[in-house]
Image (cartoon, rainbow, N blue to C red):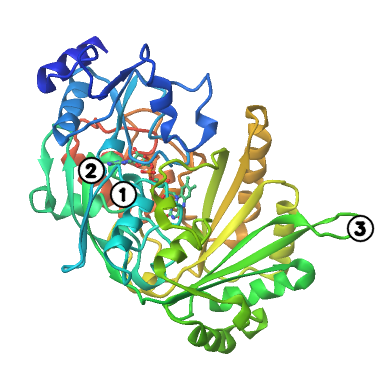
Amino acid sequence: SNNFLQCFHSKTNISISNSTSNVIFDRNGTSYASVLQSSAQNLRFVTPSTPKPILIIRPLHESHIQAAVVCAKESNINIRIRSGGHDYEGLSYVSNVPFIIVDLSNLRSITVDIENGTAWVESGGTLGELYHTIAEKSKVYAFPAGSCSTIGIGGHLGGGGLGTIFRKYGLAADNVIDAKIVDANGRIFDRKSMGEDLFWAIRGGGGASFGIIFAWKIKLVPVPSIVTVFSIEKTLEKGATELLQKWQLIADKLSQNLFLHAVMDGVDSGGENSNKTIAVSFAALFLGGSEELLTLMDESFPELGVERKDCTEMSWIQSVLYFAGFSTEGSYDVLLNRTNPNKSSFKAKSDFVKEPISEKGLEGLWKILLEEQSGYMIWTPYGGRMSEISENEIPFPHRSGNLYEIQYMVTWEAEGETDAHVDWIRRLHDYMTPFVSKNPRSAYLNYRDLDLGINRNENESYGDASVWGLKYFNSNFKRLAQIKAQVDPSNFFWYEQSIPLFVSQV
Ligand code: FDA
């Protein structure tokens, strides 16, 4: 670390001893542990035996990012880039080789320009901060991104970003119109100077393979002043299986203004011998009033039995609170809280479904789901705008032809329980093989899963990395690897699932 510190000092005039500005944190410092843990979301990677960074750099200015890149390269130290720390496999704050973390949490300014329907957002901002800032300026503008308010802008936009209005407006990454990046040589580029290839790659290709993106210009989208939500829970005894069968046929074909996802887990059946059953919660956001929603539901999914009393009209920002699990009555200032109060250890996986799963298939699925106390699934309907955008528009390829996406999740508290829960989710994933996409069996980058495959070292070949790369990116993987070879030929921005270099044979 001495080489790095000397170099960093020479470029920024900041050293550990004069660092009153809290830019550098080393292992001897009193705040090191709290800064390291501050945004680390998965407690599975916050244990005494987890490898720790040599230093954490929290830039206050883009020139600090430039210095960190140049000095890490000179000192041969790996960099982990962290914005909101929500990476499912902890890749933004854990590495098995000597590393530093560049933690962007101090770079989080958000400038909303309602007149032009755009905003500049720094990567260290959270989705909650972005939604809050937009709502302060206008009740009829929004941004299509994820539901959890503590997610960081940097990782989310770089990996895709989907939420309750993506059937109308696409992914967060589909709505990026400019970006600023520090490349492997410490140079700063914007869209114009980085060129369209690199600009394409960082919108869904996982930005960390290409550089440190510190700011994004995004397109805001219009929403009505009144939206409507409902959530209806049905157990197996109340016809959940039949309802899901119908849901599979219609959820992707509903109006683009209607998002209706299904969340399912095992619950107590409430009977005398307290058997367990599956509960499926159908939760909706409709961009419009309840009258129109009821008509739509009556036409397309009368079996669910949605009634006026189930519907609540609210503003879009209240719907953000609703889907983030906050009270819709209180102030939306809770979105400014950067720490998720419900941290746990977890493991997740994803799948894409192209054909409805049969009743028999669902029944087998319920058996496995009932074996795990804290496992659940979220089924997110595709279609709408997602089917209109071409597979190659940005690196995220999962568009037309997908009915819905599944996220499998299991959480736990005690470190000793890890193996049992991870075994369970792997079994569940195995069971689903016949029912989900094939050749490749697709996965969503932002639900990162190292079981799909990893780069063993920085020399991993394009061919070997294709094992996992095609799952995330399908035919876009090759273009990503060609761009990587151009912009980072020394593979400085290497990590377990970074894009490998594709060098064509002459
Ligand atoms: P983090 O900082 O951990 O970064 C994730 C990855 O991006 C790492 O590889 C990191 O190095 C890289 N990176 C981060 N900042 C970068 C930058 N500035 N430049 C280059 N590379 C950078 N997703 C979704 O689409 N919809 C949803 O509703 C949800 N909900 C959700 C809830 C919860 C509780 C969690 C933990 C996660 C989600 N996600 C999600 C997944 C989320 O979108 C995904 O984990 C994002 O990558 C998180 O971005 P962060 O910046 O927080 O992560």
Q: Amino acid at mark 3?
A: Glu
The quarter of the rendered structure image containing the C terminus is: top left
Q: Which residue is mark 2?
A: 213
> Where does the image place residue 338, in percent across and percent down from the top left?
40, 43
* Mark 3 or 1, closer to the camera: 3
Q: Earlier in the sequence, mark 3 or mark 2?
A: 2
Q: Is residue 280 above or below residue 212?
A: below
Q: Is residue 307 visible?
A: yes
Q: Which residue is mark 3?
A: 272
Quick one: 115 or 166, which is closer to the camera? 115
Q: Residues within 10 Å of mark 2 (few under 14, many from 20)?
A: many
Q: Is mark 1 within 8 Å of ligand 1?
A: yes
* Image quadrant where residue 63 sits: top left
Mark 3–mark 2 distance (CA, rounded to whole Å): 56 Å
Classify mark 1: helix, strand or loop.
helix
Q: Which residue is mark 1?
A: 158
Mark 3–mark 1 distance (CA, rounded to whole Å): 50 Å
Quick one: 9 or 393, which is closer to the camera? 9
